[in-house]
Amino acid sequence: MSRIIVMAAVAAGTLALAACGTTIEQKAASGAVAGAVVGGPVGAAVGGAAGTVVGQAQKPN
């Protein structure tokens, strides 16, 4: 059970770091770095995707 809690906390931290930066590219890069630290290459891909999604969602229309 504690592994699930740790994984959820890490995922929340990765998503929070994915929001760092002012451009979509910076958000994707910061998410990729955070994901790489947590989960290696797969984490980098997930973090980069999360950063891109956050950047797109925050982009002014």
Image (cartoon, grey):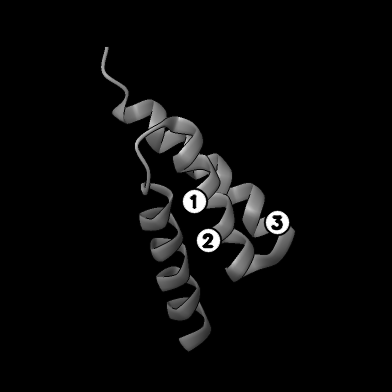
Three-letter amino acid code at disc 1?
Answer: Ser
Three-letter amino acid code at disc 2?
Answer: Ala
Which residue bears the numbered disc 3? 42
Q: In this view, does 30 lie to the left or right of 43?
A: left
Which residue bears the numbered disc 2? 34
The spot of residue 22 in percent (x, y) is 34, 36
The spot of residue 50 in percent (x, y) is 49, 43
Q: Could you tell me which secondary element the residue under label 2 belongs to?
A: helix
**Distance from the alpha carbon under mark 3 to that under mark 1:** 15 Å
Work out whether residue 60 can be spotted: yes
**Distance from the alpha carbon under mark 3 to that under mark 2:** 11 Å
Q: Which of marks 3 and 1 is in front?
A: 1
Q: Residue furthest right?
A: 41
Q: Nearer the viewer, mark 3 or mark 2?
A: 2
Q: Which residue is drawn at 46% across and 63% down?
A: 11
Q: Are marks 1 and 2 in contact (CB under 8 Å)?
A: yes
Which residue bears the numbered disc 1? 30
Q: Which residue lies furthest to the bottom in this view?
A: 2
**Few, some or many residues within 10 Å of mark 1 (<14, 14–19, 20+):** many
Q: Could you tell me which secondary element the residue under label 3 belongs to?
A: helix
**Few, some or many residues within 10 Å of mark 3 (<14, 14–19, 20+):** few
Three-letter amino acid code at disc 3?
Answer: Val
**Few, some or many residues within 10 Å of mark 2 (<14, 14–19, 20+):** many
Image quadrant occupied by the C terminus: top left
